[in-house]
Amino acid sequence: MDVNNAPLLEVTDIRKVFVDNEFQTHVLKGVTFSLGRGEMVAMLGPSGSGKSTLLSILGTLMKPTSGSFRMLGRELTGMGERDLSQFRNQEIGFIFQYHHLLPDFTALENVLFPHAGRVGRETKEGRERAAMLLERVGLRDRMNYRATRLSGGQKQRVAIARALMNKPALVLADEPTGNLDRENADAAFALMTEIQRETGTTFLLSTHDRELAERCERRIYIRNGVVADEANELLQPAAKPAQQPWRVIGGAGAMIDRTGSPQADDDRRRA
């Protein structure tokens, strides 16, 4: 198979069951889809449909109960945590709704952190790339400001730059504009689209914003833990949110591993 023509990501029958004592919550019930290289794809669905759980699994932060997924030709489901951590740090970028910047660090330091974690130290090349990315997102005059001095829109632009620091093949964005007003949401999405076209990076965006989703090249609808047909998704009533545990990744008291990536969930209490 020509690796250049192969899908970037192949997801096959992914299932996730959370177990709390004798209770089981089936969140994902057999999700299958693929992402091409350089695509901008929106993932939509009601709250509780499993979008965030799926992003956590695809970001290798959580293990599926069953199923498999491949990225860049590598099977990730059975990979050890050390190898997963290295792969995640190099090939996957994350953008969160609440940006999760480290408040006591400058914009430049926040963007630099994934690179410094990967190579074990701060480098001149790393600082130059971080500065270039901040200039690219329009924050050249704010790169030495602490995160607490930035506006909400500026913080999200820093988060976008941070996600691109290690030149990932895939960026996973969980409601990246959900905490922004319309103007800043449109600006953040336009920036992601420009970068996607310039770099060929694949973006998978989880969102409730249909207006932004319609601007993406493709849309994936998740309903009741499976990929739903678009027509059915538009006609059916919203499902009740599934009960599931939530984790905070990043931010104050950030759960960051030594590679600069959010820590993976060991799933010791989950099926």
Image (cartoon, helix red, strand yellow):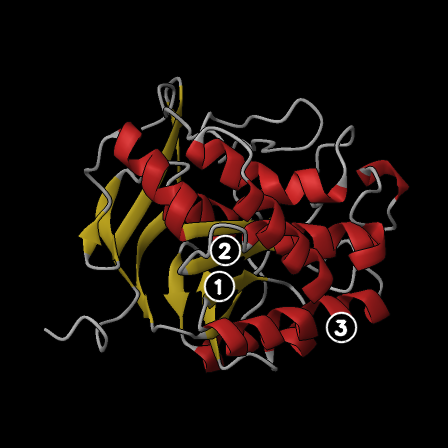
> Which of 132 and 8 lies nearest the eye of the viewer?
132
Figure quadrant of residue 111: top right
- Look at the numbered discs 2 and 3 and tell me whether their residues touch, using CB distance below 8 Å: no
| Of callouts 1 and 3, the N-terminal one | 3
In this rendering, does residue 100 appear at all? no
Q: Report the residue marked by disc 1.
A: 204
Q: Is residue 29 left or right of residue 228?
A: left
Separation (CA) of disc 1 from disc 3: 17 Å
Residue at (72, 62) in percent of width and height: 135
Separation (CA) of disc 1 from disc 2: 5 Å
Give amino acid for label 1.
Answer: Leu
Please state the horizontal and vertical placement of residue 152, each as a whole percent of the image.
83, 51
Give amino acid for label 2.
Answer: Leu
Please state the horizontal and vertical placement of residue 185, each as a whole percent of the image.
76, 66
Q: Residue 172 shows which numbered tag?
A: 2
Residue at (67, 71) in percent of width and height: 191
Give amino acid for label 3.
Answer: Asp
- Look at the numbered discs 1 and 2 and tell me whether their residues touch, using CB distance below 8 Å: yes
Q: Report the residue marked by disc 3.
A: 186
In the figure, 61 relative to 154: above or below? above
| Of callouts 2 and 3, the N-terminal one | 2
Q: Secondary structure at mark 1?
A: strand
Please state the horizontal and vertical placement of residue 37, each as a whole percent of the image.
35, 72
How packed mark 1 is, by other alpha carbons closer than 10 Å (few <14, some 14-19, many 20 or more), is many
Q: Secondary structure at mark 3?
A: helix
